[in-house]
Amino acid sequence: MNLIGEVLLRRSCLKVGMKVFPPWYAHYSTTAGGARVAKKASKVVPVVTALALASILAKKWYDDSQVKKADLASVTVDPSISAFPKKMGPPQWPLATQYELLGKGVRCVSSLTFKAYGMGIYMAAEDKHLVAEVLDSKFLSQALIDTVSPPLQAKTHQENLRVALNDPAKAPILINNLLDGGIRFMSKNTPIKAGSFKLLMDGTRRSVLKNPDAQSQDEDLLEAGFQELHDCFRSVKGLVARDDDFFIELNKDCSMNLSYYARKKDEFVVLGTVKEPLIGKLLFAHYLAGVDPPSVEARQEVVDALVSLA
């Protein structure tokens, strides 16, 4: 609008009593009207800034609280795989019962630099009280645990138990008594390197045979148990992705439930049950008392947990 047109418009508005509003670009000017606009803006900006800052702080507090909750509920085994829950069971996980983590570690193959999988050993929460009942028995105490002589050198029962559980000769006997006592365990194996279901099956079989007691067992029973293990893997083929989970649940009768969790698909697959108790007992005795267990770190943490429960 040119200057003449603007003047005529203002005069006509005055004649009819209409209010003339300042042009839209008034806040760019150096007039008094512009100063008033700037003054209003100076009040609004601090409020907006404060609200934004409060929003950022609230988000940070929420994120921190979530991290703390995650830290309380899980534990890192290796940075390349998901943290292991300290408690696992229904309804979130279709497992037989509620389990609590005893120990965790990494299985290294060939060298300390080649990490195969993360391993967690869990115990049924309902069975924790049985540890003390088994390991505090008079027979085990006198025969294997509290056997220090002379009496002046004797330590506490828990200190003696730790020594016995780290003794290659005594540990298998104590662990076998726990397994015979009906305590349910669960192993969670999470690949750090992608593999195959055949590797999972073969690795489980090798762990059973690594137990020195396997050499003195009935070969027919062993082969029958290995056939059941093979049958469990018939329904699955192909690769096992990194960060998936392979579960082995040891029941009261030492039968084993096998299952698999595909993390990306969020799919839980029940593989089957190995009913022959010899397989489950030899396997978990190797995990918990073997001279060369899959994870030395996991086994040592299990020892510490068992001592605390005794």
Image (cartoon, rainbow, N blue to C red):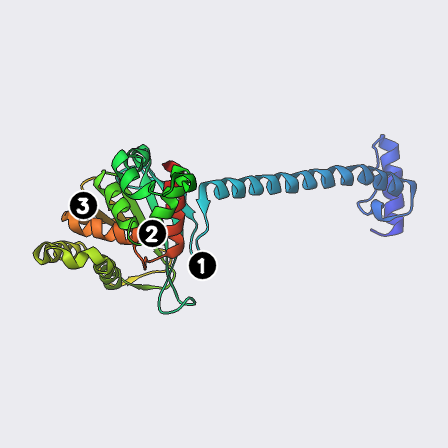
Read off the residue under disc 1.
Answer: 80
Badge 1 element:
loop
* Residue at the far top in the pictured view: 17
Q: Quadrant of residue 229?
A: bottom left
Task: Report the residue at 29% width, 34% height from top.
Answer: 130
Separation (CA) of disc 2 from disc 3? 27 Å
Identify the disc placed on residue 43: none
**Image point (82%, 40%), residue name:** 42
Amino acid type at image mark 1: Ser
Which residue appears at 30% of the width and 51% of the height? 289
Question: 234 or 289: which is nearer to us?
Answer: 289
Asked if residue 40 is positioned above or below residue 121 in the image, the reply reads above
Instruction: Find disc 3 in the rendering and name its residue.
Output: 255
Q: Nearer the viewer, residue 248 or 182?
A: 182
Task: Give the label, 1 or 2, closer to the camera.
Answer: 2
The quarter of the picture where residue 57 lies is top right
Residue at the disc numbered 2:
167
